[in-house]
Amino acid sequence: MGVGIRSGALAPTTTTLNVNTPGIDNAVINGSVNTNGPAATAWFEYGTDPTLATFTKTSDQAIVAGTVPQSFNATLLGLTLERYTISGLRLPAPWVRRKGR
């Protein structure tokens, strides 16, 4: 899960929700983002390495400014029959990102 801190502002909140699997080689990851103020860009990071030393990043998606949770999702294509780790949503600068679970 991406967690951000910005001086003088509430930290954004991110929640990774359910994963839908409409096919054998694809999935849709769902999440929620509350930027608690400014607009941001968000994405998911995922991969087969449990530590996510190497990972794939989904496309950036714009999240509008606000103080209420906003839905966010990404479609993963070309998956194999392996176990995947999803680190959660990420928010870039001006937020300081820390990896979490």
Image (cartoon, rainbow, N blue to C red):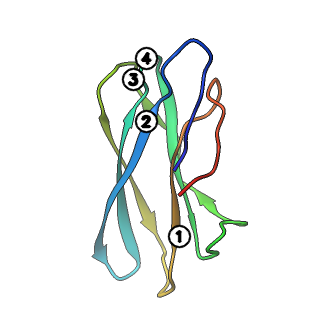
Q: Are marks 1 and 3 in contact (CB under 8 Å)?
A: no
Is 78 displayed left or right of 7 in the figure? left
- From the top left corner, tell me how far across and down residue 23 is, in percent: 31, 78
Label 1, label 3: how far apart the Cα atoms are: 27 Å
Q: Amino acid at mark 1?
A: Thr
Label 4, label 2: how far apart the Cα atoms are: 11 Å
Residue 85's place in the image compared with 67, above or below, is below
Label 4, label 1: how far apart the Cα atoms are: 29 Å
Residue drawn 43% across and 26% down?
Answer: 35
Front residue of this view, candidates 83 and 26: 83
Which of pointers 1 and 3 lies earlier in the amino acid sequence? 3
| Neighbour tally class for label 4: few under 14, some 14-19, many 20 plus, Cα within 10 Å | some
Mark toward the viewer: 3 or 2: 2
Which of pointers 3 and 4 lies earlier in the amino acid sequence? 4
Which of pointers 1 and 2 lies earlier in the amino acid sequence? 2
| Location of mark 3 (residue) | 64
Label 3, label 4: how far apart the Cα atoms are: 9 Å
- From the top left corner, tell me how far across and down residue 68 is, in percent: 29, 26
Front residue of this view, candidates 36 and 83: 36
- The answer to which image quadrant residue 18 occupies is bottom left
| Location of mark 2 (residue) | 13
Q: Circle 2 — which element?
A: strand
Q: Circle 4 — which element?
A: loop
- From the top left corner, tell me how far across and down residue 73 is, in percent: 36, 50
Which of pointers 4 and 1 lies earlier in the amino acid sequence? 4
Label 1, label 2: how far apart the Cα atoms are: 20 Å
| Location of mark 1 (residue) | 85
Which of pointers 4 and 2 lies earlier in the amino acid sequence? 2
Front residue of this view, candidates 97 and 76: 97
Residue drawn 65% across and 44% down?
Answer: 98
| Location of mark 4 (residue) | 37
Q: Amino acid at mark 2?
A: Thr
